[in-house]
Image (tube, rainbow, N blue to C red):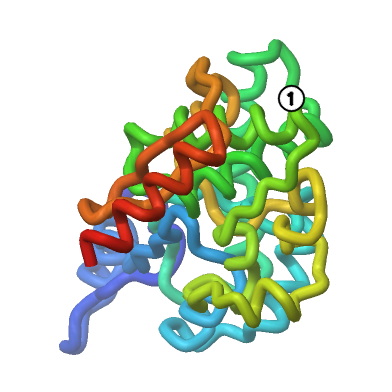
Amino acid sequence: MGQPQHGWIFIGKHQLNRIDFLHKLTSSKAMIHKITLIPGETLELFFDSLAKQYGLNKEKLWKYYREYSPYPEAGIYADTYYVPVGIGEKHLMQFLVRQSERRYAALANKIYGVYDKKQWKKILITASIIQKEAANTKEMPLVASVIYNRLKRKMRLQMDGTLNYGKYSHVKVTPARIRDDNSTFNTYKFKGIPPSPIGAVSLAAIKAAVKPAKTTHLYFMKNAQGTHNFSDTFSAHRKNIKKVKESK
């Protein structure tokens, strides 16, 4: 009759004879959960959601994630996953991290010819900033160019998105927050990129981090349309700021 299905399956609500029961075991579809990690989201909030929605233990999710993933954040690729009902914290983290590692390894090998996790961590950090800052996919290579141009000039990145790490994923960045946050994620205070990614990343963000646009842009400012105006000088940047204020 075939092999039993893996995971939880639905065999109906009524009494079955032995033959029908065996048929259900070999032919019924496994019951699955659809889990989606949104690009830009942090694991802190993702694990919160998993724990509440599926009755899992958040501390165990973190424990096994740290055990299996080489990255403090972004070790799970932003995507939709299908997992069997009843899966535990350990096997869920094994599955999600393993799938992500396969994808990262394939991308890194295609681009660099090797999957160097130290090198890839820097790509994930940059991609996670791009993911937070860009208004859309089209802007991502431009935002990437600003990041690399500022780093090359040893300028602070001064990007709000880097402060949306961990539990602060959706918290508005205020002047007080910029002043009081003394972590190395605060790129207003510290030069260079943060110590680890600040959220999950998409393929588009990774591609932008690997191949930024060739520009001399050093600044960008959100406009009335919700996208960004890019500029090469501080004086031009100030003009863009003035335009936005006048349009309000």
Q: Residue visible at 57% across and 65% down?
A: 42
Residue 186 position within the rendered picture, expressed as x and y whole percent measured from the top left: 73, 63
> Label 1 neighbourhood size at 10 Å, few (<14), some (14-19), many (20+)?
some
Residue 14, quarter of the rendered image: bottom left
Q: Is residue 71 left or right of residue 77?
A: right
Vertical order, 153 against 112 (above or below) = below
Residue 230, quarter of the rendered image: top left
According to the image, label 1 marks what residue? Answer: 115
Residue closer to the observer: 74 or 20: 74
Q: Is residue 130 left or right of residue 196?
A: left
Q: Is residue 97 left or right of residue 83?
A: right
Vertical order, 100 against 17 (above or below) = above
Three-letter amino acid code at the position of disc 1 = Tyr
Q: Residue visible at 49% across and 76% down?
A: 172
Residue closer to the observer: 176 or 17: 176
Residue 184, quarter of the rendered image: bottom right
Q: Residue visible at 56% across and 59% down?
A: 161
Vertical order, 239 against 23 (above or below) = above
Q: Secondary structure at mark 1?
A: loop
Residue 239 position within the rendered picture, expressed as x and y whole percent measured from the top left: 40, 45
Residue closer to the observer: 53 or 163: 163
